[in-house]
Amino acid sequence: MTRLGRVLGVCILTIVGTLFLGWWSVPIAAALIGWFDRRARHPAIDGALGAALGWAILLARYAAYGDLRGFGAMLGGVLHVPAWAPTAITLAYAAALGAAGAALGAALAATLRRPLPQRRGRVGGRPPR
């Protein structure tokens, strides 16, 4: 799978998972991509890009059909930050979740694919002779 395929896969899984299951589906979606693609050199970067892109698409959708700008300005006023900061923080949070999930999925896949070490010594109940 190419890097673009991994990023788009995480993006699509993030969008669908967020719509139906909520924010915690983001690291799960990224972990699935990290688990199944063995050849990825930097799965955390792919997971971060895909998750941030997925949430950016969702935020754009909400901005087109809702009052995201007014909400950002109100939340920015409460937190004493610029109006764009809540959106940037949201995308950074998605990227962090995606990176952590993809890295965890790739690490678990690499660990579980290794052969088990050979045991030497006592087998059964008798000492070796």
Image (cartoon, grey):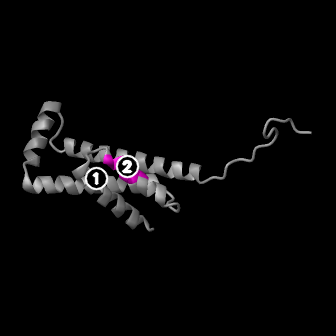
* Quarter that holds the N terminus: bottom left
Q: Is residue 121 left or right of residue 115?
A: right
For mark 1, what is the residue?
A: 17
The answer to the question of whether label 1 and label 2 lie on touching residues, with beta carbons closer than 8 A, is: yes
Sequence-wise first label, 1 or 2: 1
Q: Quadrant of residue 9?
A: bottom left
List the single residue furthest toward the right. 129
Location of mark 2 (residue): 28
Pick the front one: 12 or 128 = 128
Question: Mostly what secondary structure, the magenta segment?
Answer: helix
* Region of the chain picked out in magenta, as a range: 25-31
Helix, strand or loop at mark 1: helix
Q: Is residue 29 magenta?
A: yes
Mark 1 residue crowding within 10 angstroms, few (<14) / some (14–19) / many (20+) = some
Amino acid at dot 2:
Ile
Q: Is residue 83 left or right of residue 35?
A: left
Q: What residue appears at the point 10 percent right and 47 percent down from the top-left corner?
A: 69
Query: Where residue 17 appears, x then y in whole percent?
Result: 28, 52
* Name of the residue lying farthest toward the front: 125
Q: Which mark is residue 88?
A: none
Type of amino acid at the residue the image marks with label 1: Gly
| Helix, strand or loop at mark 2 | helix
Q: Which corner quadrant of the image does residue 57 belong to?
A: bottom left
> Which residue sits at x=13%, y=53%?
62
* Crowd class of label 2 (few under 14; some 14 to 19; many from 20; radius 10 Å): many
Membership of 19 in magenta stretch: no
